[in-house]
């Protein structure tokens, strides 16, 4: 059990900020709970009468925890304030907006609760210290993905404008309440009856989309351009994350490593139960690029596996050249196949005050930007159903 309360999941963003005394962009430290980054930025923009485009940040932090991160506002006025479940504090100015390239790492302090005992977690920690963990994109990245509708970005790459728009507006995702689920299911059922869809539309985006389609029933391209650039970019990154995860899955399987699988929203997460020093060294040195037209592979076997994935879908690398929506591009960046958390510490272990008769353990560790603490927690709480998960005693490390 994690995130039983916000204080159980604390994240602090570490950034290398190039402050400039007369910079165009005001830099703020944002502390929040019960807000995800997208929603708090929209709230701040509305509250201060600013355009959403004036705000920039490096990473999205979800609402289930206490999080601290940096953002910039292209604005001369100090917007520092304390609001409901957030605090915005000015800390300088820069000549450029905040971006993911300025993030160095994230520091996590996490309480894992409702444990029957601590020995299995402590054994798992030993394995994590020595063997690291696969650097999966976790389910948080796939919250907008509905397996029944498919990937928005994949449909864009194939030129399926109607399918992409339908996936964007009717996908059933984990965070939806019952009413919104039913409304989206009804939109899906009525799809192409644009007048009926218009009566169900909520918000400016949906209303404008169905207004276009009522007048020009097959004008899906223009309708797609109503989607904000930030949301389109996120949908692109979701598909890139899926392809990257699938490539790592195939690499692990091709190397014959014994694994335990944890189900995931867009495919299983594999964790090796036994690994030799050489296998570990090979994977630790491996970096895999995210999907785009131009990709730099350091491993020829990984490049071949990636081409197989594309062929099965079917896609080609040239398809990623698309700039149909607001001239957004797929950009490739390298991502380590394996990570070892820095400064991994046990801060507290013992009785769980929230769950009588149960145990808890409190951890602190540092991960590079873009890596998920929840993947480490998945590995930490793997069921010890295989003898391979026992600590090695053969001197392999």
Image (spheres, grey):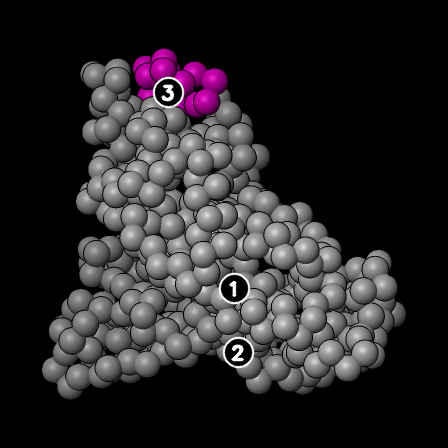
Q: Position of residue 182 (x, y in %)?
A: 53, 28
Give the labeled residue for mark 2.
366
Query: Which of 67/363 is in front?
Result: 363
Q: Give how far apart the Cα atoms at labels 1 and 2 are.
A: 17 Å
Give the labeled residue for mark 3.
197
Q: Position of residue 305 (x, y in %)?
A: 50, 48
- Secondary structure under the numbered disc 3 in the rendered image: helix
Q: Position of residue 391 (x, y in %)?
A: 80, 75
Q: Quadrant of residue 210?
A: top left
Q: Does the segment drawn in magenta span residue 112?
A: no
Give the labeled residue for mark 1.
337
Q: Residue at x 51, y 36 (%)?
A: 146
The nearer-to-camera label among 1 and 2 is 1
Label 3 crowd (10 A; few <14 / some 14-19 / many >=20): many
Q: Is residue 27 visible?
A: yes
Query: Which of 394/145 is in front?
Result: 394
Seen in the image, is 309 located left or right of residue 169? right
Q: Give how far apart the Cα atoms at labels 3 and 1 are.
A: 44 Å
Question: Chief secondary structure of the magenta span?
Answer: helix
Quadrant in which the N terminus appears: bottom right
User: Bounds of the magenta span?
Assistant: 187-203
**Compared with residue 175, is residue 273 higher up or lower down, i.e. above or below?**
below
Q: Is residue 138 visible?
A: no
Q: Give how far apart the Cα atoms at labels 2 and 3 are.
A: 47 Å
Q: Residue at x 39, y 77 (%)?
A: 104
């Amino acid at each position: 059990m994690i995130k039983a309360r916000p204080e159980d999941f604390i994240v602090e963003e570490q950034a290398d900020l190039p402050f400039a005394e007369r910079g165009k962009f005001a830099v703020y430290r944002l502390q929040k709970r019960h807000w995800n980054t997208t929603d708090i930025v929209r709230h701040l923009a509305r509250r201060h009468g600013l355009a959403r485009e004036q705000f920039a940040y490096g990473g999205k932090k979800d609402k289930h925890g206490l999080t601290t991160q940096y953002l910039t506002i292209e604005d001369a006025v100090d917007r520092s304030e304390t609001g409901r479940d957030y605090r915005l504090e000015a800390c300088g100015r820069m000549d450029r907006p905040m971006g993911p390239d300025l993030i160095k790492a994230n520091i996590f302090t996490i309480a894992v609760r409702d444990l029957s005992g601590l020995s299995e977690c402590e054994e798992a920690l030993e394995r994590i210290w020595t063997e690291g963990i696969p650097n999966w994109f976790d389910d948080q990245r796939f919250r907008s993905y509905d397996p029944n509708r498919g990937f928005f970005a994949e449909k864009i790459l194939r030129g399926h404008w109607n399918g992409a728009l339908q996936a964007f507006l009717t996908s059933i995702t984990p965070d939806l309440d019952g009413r919104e689920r039913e409304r989206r299911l009804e939109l899906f059922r009525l799809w192409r009856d644009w007048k009926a869809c218009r009566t169900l539309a909520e918000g400016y985006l949906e209303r404008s989309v169905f207004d276009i389609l009522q007048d020009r029933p097959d004008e899906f391209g223009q309708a797609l351009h109503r989607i904000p650039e930030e949301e389109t970019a996120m949908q692109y990154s979701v598909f890139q994350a899926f392809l990257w995860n699938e490539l790592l899955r195939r690499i692990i399987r091709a190397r014959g490593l014994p694994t335990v699988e944890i189900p995931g929203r867009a495919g299983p997460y594999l964790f090796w139960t036994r690994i030799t020093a050489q296998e570990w060294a090979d994977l630790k040195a491996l970096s895999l690029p995210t999907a785009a037209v131009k990709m730099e592979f350091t491993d020829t076997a990984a490049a071949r596996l990636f081409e197989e994935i594309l062929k099965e879908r079917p896609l080609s690398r040239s398809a990623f050249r698309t700039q149909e929506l607001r001239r957004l591009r797929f950009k490739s960046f390298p991502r380590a196949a394996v990570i070892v958390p820095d400064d991994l510490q046990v801060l507290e272990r013992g009785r769980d005050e929230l769950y009588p008769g149960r145990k808890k353990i409190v951890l602190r560790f540092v991960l590079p930007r873009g890596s998920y603490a929840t993947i480490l927690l998945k590995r930490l709480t793997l069921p010890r159903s295989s003898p391979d998960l026992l600590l090695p005693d053969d001197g392999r490390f």
